Image (tube, coloured by chain):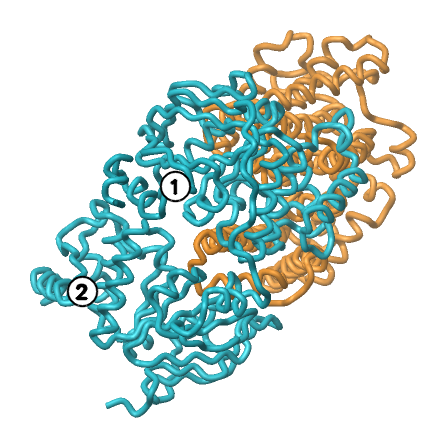
Amino acid sequence: MLKVSQPVKKVLVPLISIIAGFLVGAIIMLIFSYSPVQAYASMIRGALGTTSSIGETLRQATPLILTALGFSVASSAGFFNIGLSGQALAGWVGSIWIALAFPNLPTYILLPLAIIVGALAGALTAAIPGFLRAYFGTSEVIVTIMLNYVVLYVSTYLLQSAMPASFRSSQDATKTISSHASLRMDWLSNLFGGSRVHGGLFIALIALVLVWVIMKKTTLGFEIRAVGMNPFASEYAGMSSKRTIIMSMVLSGTLAGLGGVVEGLGTYQNFFTQTASLSIGFDGMAVSLLGSGSSVGILLSALLFSVLKIGGLGMQTGAGVPFEIVSIVIASIIFFVAIDYVIGLLFKQRQNRETEQIAARTDSKATVAVTDEQKKGGSTK
Amino acid sequence: MTKSDYVIEMRKITKDFSGFKANDEVDLKVKPGEIHALLGENGAGKSTLMNILSGLLAPTSGEILINGEPVKIDNPTVANQLGIGMVHQHFMLVDAFTVTENIILGNEPSTGGVINRKQAQKEIQELSDHYGLSVDPTAKISDISVGMQQRAEILKTLYRGANILIFDEPTAVLTPQEIDELIEIMKGLVAEGKSIILITHKLVEIKLAADRCTVIRRGKSIGTVDVAKTSSEELATMMVGHSVTFKVPKSPAKIGEPILNVKHLEVKESRGIAAVKGIDFTVHSGEILGIAGIDGNGQTELIEALTGLRKVAGGSIEIEGHDLTNAPVRKITETGVSHVPEDRHKYGLVLQMSLAENLALQTYYKSPLSRHGILDYKKIRQHALRLIKTYDIRTTNEQLKAGELSGGNQQKAIIARELDRDANLIIVSQPTRGLDVGAIEYIHRQLIDQRDQGKAVLLVSFELDEIMNLSDRIIVLHDGKIAGEVRPETTSEQELGLLMAGSSKQAAAQEVK
């Protein structure tokens, strides 16, 4: 194993997995006799070549930053939130509903109101698995996965049967929201060549800073981290692990909900029937994992993902690579990110086991041969 | 005939863990038919040396001779073939199996895939009779006492043809009576020509059992001495490198008001079985109340109930006049309770957090460490630096992760955090487990200081020495009930041992006479 210091490793591991992903993507394209050089060049051009493509990339990154932050907050508390998709969808529907219900309220009231309602809808959706885990020990993985389906089909029901007919333009889509509720900013769009980049970007950037402050500087963040790292010691110190888990999930759901809000009020300006769980939910997990949960990391990896997504379209038009191959290339990069996480998990588990063994040994001075070696190996990681 | 005077010779054994020398040219020579003690503090390198001998680790340099023949022990099977057997401290036994099944596990004698159990049982019975181990080969492990489980472990090594037996801290889990029996068994084994290496840090046992003793300190061999010609003080000095006082001096207790009042307390363990079965006791200010007992007799559950970590099933807990039965942890802490938990890695520390954050673990939510929910890291750092200085925590800096501190310094950090809060009731459980002599002495001093300042101290320990040296009063827990209350100046280890094993106070007093 390479012996590098912790911070170096933190940068090196994601970098290696990205490069490996691109290499595998190149091999796949070679197999199907497309030129990887040409394809990657048109990917870069497609994502970053013009001001408008840069704008689209930023727009794509906006919800990803928010869902990724949501994932990282929950996982700090030891909670694996796979329900980001559903929470984002709840946020999207909630914000659009408010925007359509009160189209004539002034912007300074309607816009914040729609954002807040969307965020709350996400928070509420996330609070359910948090509550079930805290009070009944239910596995959050199962509950959040199933809730994604619940929210998906409830959103279709709400759109088609619960919303007043006057909100709808067709059976499958709502009307466009009024400009009073829109996150679109003309100056911003113009700055980026008329792209759909919108004010949600600022929400995402503010959230990046806020989450950092909450996690590092507040007692709530201290509690979330402590409960995530050692629930027993946290309980010993008088923290309520139930309250902390629910709080972290509410925070996580708020962020995911905002991810949906910026899609609704910013990118699409309406809500339309979804046939599958929102991809920003799952991409957000990958972004958070690739960015190893830190604010700067999440910003950078959200940008990378957006480059892949937006640039992928460019590969299709610029290098004639079929979209299926583009998807494989993007997937292989995500795959290597996931592998990195698996490696990270192994590290973590090994560390836990190691701690247990050291604990067992100090208990009793029992001897476990491997611990010494791991202890030594572990300290140089 | 052996060609050598020594059954085992380990010459200049060095084990280098990427720059850290766990063993640095260590020599160990064991004569046939002797009990050879290997003495050293925690982390001195005893375990590493024994792991090398039993094939679990490969030495970086050095050589091993068995009966004068140089050998290469590169895996445990080789060690087995050379007749080296280890009696582990944590028994490697399957609870649901019988003694016989456990012993043959891994190399079952069989004919055509069918285990030849009768034959094995007979052999094991013979071995047990021969060495006077009185183990019933048909008994299930879960039904027999800890002492007998250990004898089953011994039988296992003998059955596999061990000639050299390594005992790893064998007495940690035994009552004083069982320790006496074990020493008899070890003497019986060497009388039959076996050789024994006894790993320990308990000087009393070395004086009782061992013929010679090799002392290692910080990975280096300090010397080998004849136990009969060496005093305990000399051995201790060799082990730690400077002279130590065994008994922290203390003045008579000035007993004040009752601080902790426990009435008819009943607590269930996690499986719902009663663990604490209706006990009453009081701890006063200015005294140390020791709770003695063998591990697993309700101590853990009692402490967890007192500190709010476990639900109380019946009875009441009153601290400084407040009824705190089933109160939340933080309310109990705020009333004025410090708690040094039994398991410092699980409960005492968040190992991945910095030392500074760990030192703030109980007070982070209050001024001055935080204000309106915002942490003040400057104050947290100052707080940490002050504790590090006052309580002599050895660390490179306050940002080091708690998991990277040594065991002794981890415990000092917990003690610092808890004592600094100036609570009137201090609950300490196993405060010196796994620590070296220096750290033990320091912690004992701190506890006596607290007592002298008028604090009420409740001490749970499985170490009889610790209980005897520190306590002003001792209650003995057996099977979740108080088996008796004694005073350290009028009781003996024998009486305590009998109480711990479940004798009534009268019976124990009788037997000691």
Which shade of the palette goes to chain A? orange
Give coordinates of residue B46: x percent, y percent. Answer: 46, 68
- Of the pair A226 and B51, the residue shown nearer to us: B51
Is residue A39 in sight in this rendering? Answer: no
SS category of the residue bearing label 1: loop
Q: Are marks 1 and 2 on the same chain?
A: yes
Residue at 32% in and 41% down: B500
SS category of the residue bearing label 2: loop
Q: Earlier in the sequence, mark 1 or mark 2?
A: 2
- 1 vs 2, front mark: 1
The quarter of the displayed image where residue B371 is located:
top right
Residue type of the residue flagged with mark 2? Glu
- The residue under label 2 is B108
- Of the pair B58 and A346, the residue shown nearer to us: B58
Chain corresponding to cyan in the figure: B
Give coordinates of residue B203: x percent, y percent. Answer: 43, 62
Is residue B180 in sight in this rendering? Answer: yes
Mark 1 → mark 2, Cα distance in angstroms: 52 Å
Rendered image: mark on residue B490: 1
- Among all residues in the image, which is located at the extreme bottom? B3
Residue at 78% in and 39% down: B377
